[in-house]
Amino acid sequence: MLAAPDGGLSLTIAQIVERLKGSGLHAQLERQARLSLHNPEIKLQSLKEDIKEFLKTSGWEKKLQNAVYREISMVDSDIASSWTVKSRFIKSRFPLPCPPSVPPEHMKESLAYMRKAQGNWEKRILKSLNSMCTELGIPLSQKRSPNEQKELLNKWNEMGTDEPDLSHFRPVYAPKDFLEVLMNLRNPNYDTSEQSNFRNHLGLIQVPLNVKDIPELKEYFSELDLNIGQMDIDDSAHVPPELFENEHVRIGQKVLMEQDSAAAQQYVRQGCPNSLRAELWALILNISSQPEDILYYEQLKSNVIQHDLLVDSLIYKDVKLTASNDDYYFVFEDYLYQVLLCFSRDTSVLEHFVYNSATPPKSYIRGKLGMEQYAVFYPPNGVIPFHGFSMYVAPLCFLYNEPSKLYQIFREIYVRYFFRLHSISSHSSGIVSLCLLFESLLQTHLPQLFYHLREIGAQPLRISFKWMVRAFSGYLATDQLLLLWDRILGYNSLEILAVLAAAVFAFRAGNLMEVTSLAAAEAVLADLSTLKVMPLLQIFLFATGS
């Protein structure tokens, strides 16, 4: 990775400062600085230094540090990784988020064929949505009548008891539809037959991207080594599990007391104690639930009450088809409706399209078709839900029972990570790279299994794709899923999903070698609820002799 030139650091800082100027934190800092002027310890002759000291001792400097760290994390996971627990300032070596010479579209995705594929996929989704709209004779959006508003407000906390007729609604797309698109991706300027490092790749993904091999993964996920203590591992080589857990909890409490996002991110790489996870995740994601955040959530709720969107029915349908039928999550049905309906109205989510390869879909005010000045984003957040989307929220309900806090956590996790699981890009945490990483790991380290499954028409990716698209939500037991998501936040990367998918195949390799069809292979891997995440990952990465 290239270091920024001397002027680059100044530009990077300027970009971060500009973003922070528009945040609530900036206003709070200004207010605190003004209030500090009434403090007798603040002297006119040393005003600047005294205010700095006041902000430091009162905890506002740490809040600013965490906000800067969030901005860096959003830009690039590699930059964030370089900000270690001991770091307190931005280092002088890290790449620019976006050099001045880079066109805006390259911020979203540098490869033209990826941008084109994403654009075509968006047109297909929008066509599906518009077709449904036309077939059912339902507008994309309409104002609810006063009676409908009152009724929805009264049942806001028990929407799960509602049984609307959703039989005519269908998901806009399912993961298998998305996989078919990814399988057809090709780089028109690249002849795979001439490239020795890719021509032997026999998987479904046929675009050459740089993905890590086992040695690189071992280095990247070095804190998962067999000799390093982990939560939910009972056979640590050096420390009895109860002693490790007690010490880990003590350190976690200290991290929370320090309120340092970077330290929290490093800490969760070894897993979170259940009692501290909610607070640690909120610290990593820089979520503090200020009064204005609660007010914002209430405004979103008001928007839901006032307007009925077509995507509301898609959300209802998705929850009914997925979480409502899940033994772990059916009890959270009301929360899921509240969070997802508010999410669909949240225009702040549009900000993530600056670095998302996707583009928010537009609709036109009735009678103004094709007139750009009358175009609006639809839905308002720019995200059309697909089959399984609600499972991104469901596990979080175990951690947060206050709706506005639950909402903020989900929104932040989505705009940092989960959007990459359903958009076409070359990013290392993007779904295309995850698919290629999974196939490369399997073909390289379990060649017999890979070739056997391929020969019987059971390409492994056809089975694992749905796990990765949903970040394993709904497939693993919740306690194991949260341990997996600890590592997503800890490493600021989704690559762990591909590693776990390969590890699951390795674990069930004996049974899979006996199957003779895709259906039989799917049956062997139908139930992952008894699997333990950490032993699988450790054995696959560090005990295979790779």
Image: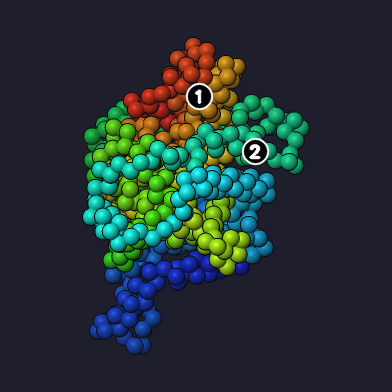
Mark 1: few/some/many CA within 10 Å (<14, 14-19, 20+): few
- The spot of residue 446 in percent (x, y) is 54, 21
Q: Residue at x 36, y 84 (%)?
A: 46
Judging depth in this view, the residue of 20 and 149 nearest the camera is 149
Image disc number at residue 545: 1
- Work out how far the residue at label 2 is from the one at label 1, CA to CA, in angstroms: 34 Å
Up-down relation of residue 290 to residue 154 (above or below): below
Q: Which residue is mark 2?
A: 185
Q: What amino acid does circle 1 point to?
A: Gly
Up-down relation of residue 514 to residue 363 (above or below): above
Left or right: 337 as drawn, with respect to 507: left
- The spot of residue 372 in percent (x, y) is 60, 65
- Kind of element beneath mark 1: loop
Up-down relation of residue 402 to residue 506 (above or below): below
| Residue 43 appears in view | yes
Q: Residue at x 45, y 33 (%)?
A: 467
| Residue 260 appears in view | no
Q: What amino acid does circle 2 point to?
A: Leu
Q: Residue at x 53, y 67 (%)?
A: 15
- The spot of residue 380 in percent (x, y) is 46, 58
- Kind of element beneath mark 2: loop
Up-down relation of residue 293 to residue 356 (above or below): below
Left or right: 14 as drawn, with respect to 63: right
- The spot of residue 27 in percent (x, y) is 37, 74
Q: Nearer the viewer, mark 2 or mark 1?
A: 2
Compare marks 2 and 1 and give the one earlier in the sequence. 2
Mark 2: few/some/many CA within 10 Å (<14, 14-19, 20+): some
Judging depth in this view, the residue of 498 and 80 nearest the camera is 498
